Amino acid sequence: MNPTKTIQSFSFLILILFKVGTAQAQLPSNEEELNRLKADVYYLADDKLKGRLTGTKGAKLAAKYICNSYKESRLKPLIGKSYLQAFDYTYSPNPHGGHGDTKKNITGKNVVGFLDNGADKTILIGAHYDHLGGNEHHNSTDPNSAGEIHNGADDNASGVAILLELARSISTTDTKENANYIFACFSGEEDGLIGSKALANYIQKNNIQLDVMINMDMVGRLNAEGSIIVSGVGTSPRFVDLIKNNTPTSLKLTMDSSGVGPTDHTSFYLKDCPVLSFFTGSHSDYHKPTDDADKINYPGMVTLNTYIYTVINALDREDSYPFTKTKVKDTKKVPRYKVTLGVMPDYADYGDGLHLDAITEGRPADIAGLKSGDIVMQIGECEIKEVYSYMGCLAKFKKGDIVLITYKRGDQIKTTKLTF
């Protein structure tokens, strides 16, 4: 999960397993399932992978491991003859907005498998497999952790492990499902949802049918109360009842209607695809070297796997999923800033300004007439090259300030007044 998530403190206790619903396929025994989930997390969060930073040897080892699991589940590649979808981006690891020699050219690789049931609808199940490496990109919440391995057991080896288990269960059933399934493990999430955006763009460009996206990010710390947050329930009018009807009473459910959040489902929501994202909450080890495999609640992961499997089966039985746009909440997650534009930025460093992925209705950027796809180049006298200089600019303004904002739309440079 990327750095905008709020850190909370959740305790680590074991939750009693439960049985929910009637699945289309017979799930494996809890013990077998637990052992596989545990093995997957321990491998992905092992020191030898050195934190799975996008573009590194550790990330490649993780991708190979995922590919082998896809082969065992008899999934086909979605793109060409390989499970791997490569994408390139430029990243500036300098948190103060430095340029020049600080920029890094990175090649990431999504791992994408496909189960073709010859159906008229397709469900994508996704989770990111990258993490922070040795804090080379300064995303750690531990200020003194440079060079220390951030294994990311919960963030997000846990989500990948459940995805691989779901792929095993869905692909080996004797009953053909009513939907096709795409299984996607994303890279580049911690640098700004880069990999999921690359796959969403590919799917749209190639006119691949996609009806629903299911995301799992940080699902390894189910607490004593069984707290689970499901986001995106407002992106289709059928989701609220579907989630309520398939959530057992042993889980404490919190629903969030918004389709935009700090993880990969956002990339697909912005393509007008209904989304659901599962999250067991943050904790004191979030984005620290201490997010290790021995702190994961593995019986809780079995519980979550069963729950998500049941939700997917319910989705499989639905005929269609109408899409609904949702409002983006202003969470004010950076308290030192007194103002905000109300935008969802593209975190990639293009060097020519802040690229806007989405605009929040009723916020300053929307009122000033900015649109998704615009590139903000200057606010007042403050020049903007990418997201870090943008954040530095925000700190200079206060509520009520009226400034000129310069942005690029297509080939035109525009300037307009904006009130914070």
Image (tube, rainbow, N blue to C red):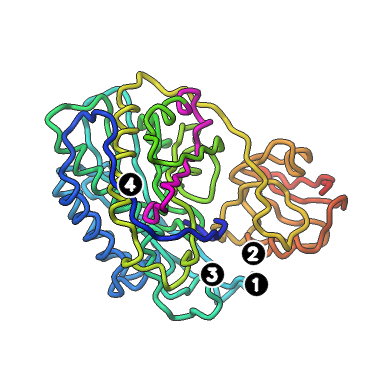
Q: Nearer the viewer, residue 275 or 375?
A: 275
Distance from disc 3 to disc 1, alpha carbons, whole Å, reads 16 Å
Relative to 315, say whether 203 is above or below: below
**x and y percent of residue 11 in the render?**
45, 60
* Circles 2 and 3 in contact, beta carbons < 8 Å: no
Distance from disc 1 to disc 4, alpha carbons, whole Å, reads 33 Å
Distance from disc 4 to disc 2, alpha carbons, whole Å, reads 29 Å
Determine if the magenta segment contains residue 221: yes
The crowding category of the residue bearing disc 4, from other C-alpha atoms within 10 Å (few below 14, some 14 to 19, many at least 20), is many
Can residue 108 be seen in the rendering of this structure? no
Magenta segment, which residues?
219-240
Q: Amino acid at mark 1?
A: His
* Circle 3 or circle 1, nearest the eye: 3
Distance from disc 2 to disc 1, alpha carbons, whole Å, reads 6 Å
Residue named by callout 1: 96
For residue 256, what is the image quadrant?
Answer: top right
